[in-house]
Image (cartoon, coloured by chain):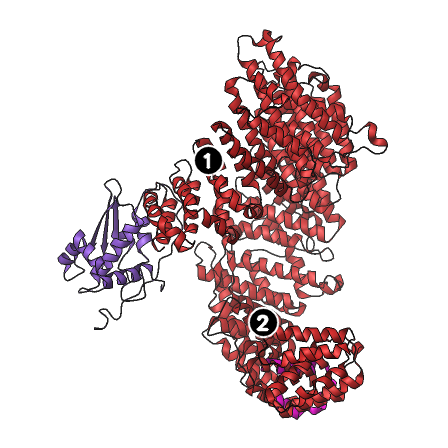
Amino acid sequence: MGGSTECVKHIELYVNSSATSLQQEASVNAIATLLKNDTLNIETLVREMEMYLTTTDHIIRSRGILLLAEVLAKLTSKPLTDTSIHSLIGFFSERLADWKASRGAIVGCLALLGRKKEVGMVTDSEAKAVALSYLQNLQVQALGQHDRKLSFRLMECILDHYACAIRDLGDVLLYGICEAIDEEKDPDCLVLVFHIIESLAKLYPDPSGPLSKFAQDLFEILGSYFPIHFTHRKGEDDDNKREELSRALLLAFASTPLFEPFSMPLLLEKLSSSLPSAKVESFRYISYCTTQYGSDRMVKYAQALWSSVKEATFISPQSTVSAESELTGGMGFLDNDMMTQAFVLLQEVMQQDIIFTNLVLSDKDINIFVNSLIESTDFGDISLLLRQKLHAAGHILSVCAKSSAASCNKVFESYFPLLMNALGISPAKPSQKSYLDDDCSVFKLNFGALYLCIDFLGACRCLTAFFDNFTLVSDFANQTWCAMLHRFSGPLMKGFISFLGSNIVDSGHNAFVYLCVKGLQTLSTFPESFVPVSKHLYDCSLLMLVSIVTSEINKTFSWTSALKALVEIGLFIDNCPDSGRASSYKSTVVEKIVFLISSGDITSSSSLKLQAAYDIGATRKEFMVRIVQGLDEAIAVHFSAAYELGNLESDKLATELLDTYSNKVLPWFLETGDSEEIPIKFALGIWANIENSRCINPRPPDNNLLGATMTAMKKAVGSCTVEGQEMIINKSYELLLESNCFESMGFQSDNCSSKLKGLQQNHNFGSSTYRYEWLISLFASVVIALRPQACIPNGKMMVQLFISAILNGHVSSAHALSALVNKLPSKITGINSFRSISLEEVLDMIFGSFFRTSSNGSMSGNDGHEIDLSGLKLDTLRIQSAKSNVVIGLAWIGKALLMRGHVKVKDITMTLLGLLMLDGNIGDSNQLQEWTEVCDEEYVPQLMKCAADSFHIIMSDSEECLNRRYHAVIRPLYKQRFFSSVIPILSSLVVKSESSSVRSMLYRAFAHVVSDAPLTAILSEAKKLIPILLDCLAILSMDVLDKDIIYNVLLVVSGLLTDRNGEEAVIGNAPRIINQLIDLTAYSQSMAIRETAIQCLVAMSELPHTRIYPLKTQVLQSISKALDDPKRIIRQEAVRCRSAWASV
Amino acid sequence: MTLGLINANPVVHAKKERHARTDDPHAVDPLDIYEHVRDIRDPEHPYSLEQLSVLSEDSVTVDEKLGRILITFTPTIQHCSMATVIGLCLREKLKDCFPPHFKVDIKVAPGSHADEESVNKQLNDKERVAAALENPNLRQLVEECLYSSEL
């Protein structure tokens, strides 16, 4: 009972004329919830509402009915009893007559008719009653737009769901619908109208049924909308809406063949319209209607259709020369919309009836054109129009040939002998086996004939590919075209090959080269069951193409087209696995290419050759594996030549090979999946190379090769599974052990050994030092890319090794160590513990040795090793740089910890901050004092700077390590977390610090943190940050070297200025911001900074007038200086800024 | 006091294509200046000066060393009383877009105007220009031409 009182309240609220639409919606929802919960049942509701449903006040009545209807619309999934449905639908269908309250009735009917069977639906007779009431009572065109839309939806719903129930209404229904839809103009309603007509056509498919009487009337209404064209454009959505309407109208047009007598004349008439869009639409409509109306109805329009297609494509072709035209020998054309649609139409009608083919073949214009073209032999004097026509004619004829075997016969009969004759090619005699004979002469250079011939071949290929699945070879053989093709394909192919092989090929013959290559490609890609060429010729053509690719690199045009053709042929083989061809492709093409790259002779234009190798390999996995084998061999050869002998050529080549490997081959295998073998083999191969070449050429390292090897190694290891990675790391670890790397790197010795020291600074380059550098760098690359699950051998030794390398300034070791710190498990479990090492242990080792070593290093600077370095500042320098190396190392470790969300990152941050403030007297921890003591006064600033820059390392993304590709552990929002924990500390330190140098370093660190932090985080703190940001800019702009940092900070500022949420904070600091920006508009070192500063000023001019008006003069004055800027872009920005501020 | 249009049926030409310039050097050149003035609206018609062929790329010369800019424009008809307004617009626009050390000379093309000499004199007389811009009606007209969004 509680339900009913509550519902009365909601009903009253809804019916009340002062209720807003939101309140009404709330009441409807509330009542619907009551009903769904069964707190209220529908009969009670109706009884409660009785007064509102029957009152004579039509406003209240209409609201009442609408409320009931809307509640019902919410209950589509709630089961209702048949009785309630029966009485409700009776009520609503009767109410359709009540024009003052019709909306409620329509919504109610719609809600009830849309119900599913499981929850109780309206019976057929009830639906029919609704339809009748609709037809008798509803004056659709007299209603408002929304009501019309609803009533069309109702009709659509009846037609879609209750078609059987209303079928016998016949004329009444059709008449009623005609009346309802006549003169509809609203686009939304029209979509429904078109759909209603489509459904009507489905309802009465019988050609002599009731629809036949009304077809003309209906089409008269429908036809007036064609073509859909908006005269008043309203917004961006127009295009979508137009598309939607046009599609709906198209479906309505084609819905029944009964429309054909009316629609075809209309469409044909529109084809001669001057409006291009109308023509395009007409072609589109006719193509679709053709498929629906059936060929017997269309035959009578054949002549008219052909002449309009001919007009659009051949007589006045509107194709434009495409951008790739150069690549296709000047015959690349882009058809405009009209031509495309015309060709689609042609294709449709061709497939309907052969009469169209006859029309095309008997067409005089085309005949004369082709004949005259064949007679003229020189391609040079063919005008653009002629080429466009040739393109169109070729397309038309190949559409004919493609449409069916019968029309293909006809096309071949009428044209093919002519073309062959023009080319001077005679059919192969049965006695003469199709071998490439020496006396085979080059065919006559006849461009038109050759072009058409290639088009025909393409068409045949399509036809065979289409029939290949369900036709026997014998069926083909009986066809005329097939027989002709068999007779001529051999000589044709020979002609192509000997043309390409002849030395007359020069740049003037690009078009012929293109066509010949394309011809070879087409003839080589016929399906296996239908082979027009012998295996021998197939091999010959592959040989020809591959010889172009291998030997004619300087002829760019032939080279690219031949490579493209080879790739296409390769792809085709891959699509239809047929062993014979695959093996000959492999033995001719792939082997040649492999030979090309593995032979020593790839020095010239190696990048093109590698490109060719990759492209051909990418066609099929089997080929790629073979190519990779070749690559591996080539890498091995050149790598050792470069590594051992210091051969500069080989060095360059090896770098290039490695780049190909890491940029193309490895990603390809990753994409195709499963092949883990390849990267493992590659990585092990590199290690084997290093192992085999015991000595390294003592030459200042050209780090290109090392860098390329490292990248390739990282990518290779990164794409392996855990097992593969373990294999690689074990192998490399063994090698490291063998080479005594650990001892020489000072492992387990308290002092740095002399070798360790020498790694970077020693000027007496010893070959072993390089070898160690190589070994450690590659080992670091392996470690960087390891997955977190991978086990590592002897972690302790490894960490120790990396630590000592870091102290010597080896950055990759810092990357590797940080990768370890990022991925190691924090606790050791299980039996693997004897091999692994836990995070805590590593951290202890790191912290211990970093601080100890640096103090020890200082000791060694005071005693001992003066023998090597006496009298030089070098030793102190080295120690100092060891300190900055430690700082860099710490930064990487900090980043690794931060990314995995470890608490220790805080310690590292504090240490870095402490170092950063060495100059001030805040550093009170013992450790730090130790550091300061041993530092030269002059060196302190450098160390501070290094500490400040380490914040950049922590915050920025790195390509080298600690990213997703190398399986880093990345907690979400880590940057944000670091930002919000460090910024308060930094800002309080800034306030406290007295020394200006410390402050400037704090600002520097601050700038790094802010510029890499996400903007949303900054926005939330904008108010506090803006003053610091401005100080930051002021201080940084004193040093020219800091321009990149300034630029990054400026970008942050501009982000704040352009975001809505930052506005309040910006308004508060407007004068200061503007002053700072004005200073930066005169920053002479960087144009980007000046430009951004001016853009920021433009953004500032949008702020509230009262805040910025006082600054107007100042800005205008300073901007007038920017008008005189040496750079044009700045001047233009300044003009924009000036006009923005002048109007303030 | 509507007197009807002075040139009721001007010949309208197509706008020239414009492209962002990336080439060095960055010295101020005629094209630079032309970019700024081509879109000034004609005082009479909703077309730009470029469309009406009042200005073309050749009508601007510049000497950066001496800091001089010379613009020679061609009124659409011989006795166009709008010539002075167009001149004023050009002067205002250049004042906004170029630093003050440039001396701007604005002239009508020789033989293109019935009263060539006096128009030239009027346009290059500082005081008369200043006085003209103090006239609220003229000022409004000039601003409409410069900041019009009708184009």
Q: Nearer the viewer, residue A42 or B125?
A: A42
Total count of labels: 2
Q: Nearer the viewer, residue A868 or A176?
A: A868
Question: Which element is circle 1 on?
Answer: helix
User: How busy is the neighbourhood of tag 1: few (under 14 within 10 Å), some, or many (20 plus)?
Assistant: some
Q: Position of residue A799 (x, y in %)?
A: 72, 25
Q: What residue appears at the point 59 percent right and 22 percent down from the top-left corner?
A: A883
Is residue B112 rendered to the left or right of residue A556?
left
Can residue A610 be seen by looking at this rendering? yes
Split into 4 quadrants, where in the image is the N terminus of chain A? bottom right
Mark 2 and mark 1 residues within 8 Å of each other at the beta carbon: no
In the image, the chain rendered in purple is B
Cα gap from disc 2 to disc 1, whole angstroms: 53 Å
Q: Nearer the viewer, residue A1125 or A292?
A: A1125
Q: What residue appears at the point 26 percent right and 51 percent down from the top-left corner?
A: B60
Question: Which element is circle 2 on?
Answer: helix
Q: Which residue is mark 2?
A: A244
Chain letter of the residue beneath label 1 in the structure image: A
Q: Position of residue A450 (x, y in %)?
A: 55, 56
Depicted A896 relative to depicted A224: above or below? above
Q: Which residue is mark 1?
A: A1043
Q: Amino acid at mark 1?
A: Lys
Chain letter of the residue beneath label 2 in the structure image: A
Q: Amino acid at mark 2?
A: Glu
Split into 4 quadrants, where in the image is the C terminus of chain A? bottom left
Q: Position of residue A517 (x, y in %)?
A: 59, 50
Range covered by the magenta-colored residues: A148-177
Q: Residue furthest top?
A: A867
Q: Position of residue A895 (x, y in %)?
A: 64, 35
| Rendering quarter of residue A660 | top right
